[in-house]
Amino acid sequence: MNLKPHFSRFLGAGPDQAGVWGSPPRFRRLHFAAHSHHPWPNVSFEAHQRAWLDAAEMMDDKWDHIFGEVIPDARTRVAAVLGLADPASLTFGPNTHSFLLRIFSCLEAPVRVLSTDAEFHSFTRQSRRWEEAGLAIVDRIPTEPYDTFADRFTREARAGVHDLIYLSQVFYDSGFAVPDLDQIVSSVPENRTFIVIDGYHAFMARPVNLGAIQDRVFFLAGGYKYAMSGEGACFLHSPPSYGPRPLDTGWYAGFGQLETGVSQTISYGADGSRFSGATFDPSGVYRMAAVLDWLESEGATPSRIHDHAMSLQARFLGGAPALGDLVIDDEARRGNFLTFRSDRAGDLYQRLHEKGVITDFRSDRLRIGFGVYQDEADVDRLLGLL
């Protein structure tokens, strides 16, 4: 799969570093932070322009177009990727954190939460603040050892004492992909329990099919990472009947009431719109729809994207010097990035950055990500620099 030429605007826009490693002028930087921020393909440029032109042409009438055409198109494409039966279960927002707050607002404090010790900073910071304020009691299951995680988490979920379960599908700090997600969900005995899957590191990185659990789980993800759509294009799938009237609500959730006014009782739609918030920049939704359409036209399914990343990972591991301990050595349980545990992680990141190679690190973990905008020559250049 050779999609690198479709990223020429992004990859060719950096400063001229040819003197550093004699690279061709078209693609000067080496970007291996695919787990964090992806370059955007060229089709996103035209989509971003389209958002501006629509605003200029339609002015205030643009919202009818956005809610009537742009968002439904994007919802249909996302639903197809996730195996959802009804695209109307999806709503869009500027970030996943706003959806988390809206979901939490449906529950009575103190909320008993089951989660892990390896969730992304956004949830970790917020949940600890809830604990400080007496709004939540959080049980955090260690992700390590990874071999026993699914069994240990399932055992806690089966206890049936939690109001909210929050779990990443692929963990940001290691790349560990949770096995038997459907089994974990089915083990929760209490139908009242809200189950939230953070799918940001899985969406468009690995095949994801929510068909069997779509009536039971909330699913959060967005465009900043593997969907290659940039910021402001996050979405939430909400299962029917869970959280019919979020306390945290915005005018997008009552878009149809703009002309008629707010009734005595605040009304909500039965679909995903009930978790909508307020005004945000819709250009990210334009970009996401365009990128997903382009990927479909190229036959770049999540499965093929994952296979491409695994192939590049194998090439890298076959020639890499000692960078530390590989956290997840089984590719069947790994997302599209490699994580190395080393007390030199920060130093390795900085030295690579000075040579025009973008990776990242978290504490003692160096992360190197692989995506469709890379080819074998990029991996070989990285190996040479290392």
Image: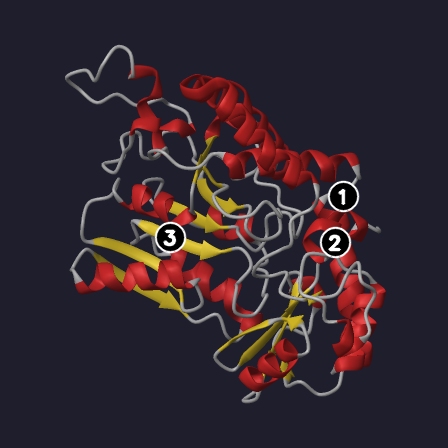
Residue tagged 3 = 165
The residues bearing labels 2 and 3 have C-alpha atoms spaced at a distance of: 33 Å
Other residues around mark 2 within 10 Å, as few (<14) / some (14–19) / many (≥20): many
**Residue 210 falls in image quadrant:** top right
Which residue corresponds to the image point at 45% horizontal and 42% vertical from the top-left? 217
- Mark in the foreground, 2 or 3: 2
Residue type highlighted by circle 1: Ala
Which residue corresponds to the image point at 52% horizontal and 36% vertical from the top-left? 283
Compared to 382, does 344 lie above or below? below
The residues bearing labels 1 and 3 have C-alpha atoms spaced at a distance of: 32 Å
* Position of residue 310 in the picture relative to residue 292 (left or right): right
Residue 7 placed where, x, y %?
73, 50
In primary-sequence order, the first of circles 1 and 3 is 3
* Position of residue 195 in the picture relative to residue 265 (left or right): right
Which residue corresponds to the image point at 40% horizontal and 37% vertical from the top-left? 280
Residue tagged 2 = 372
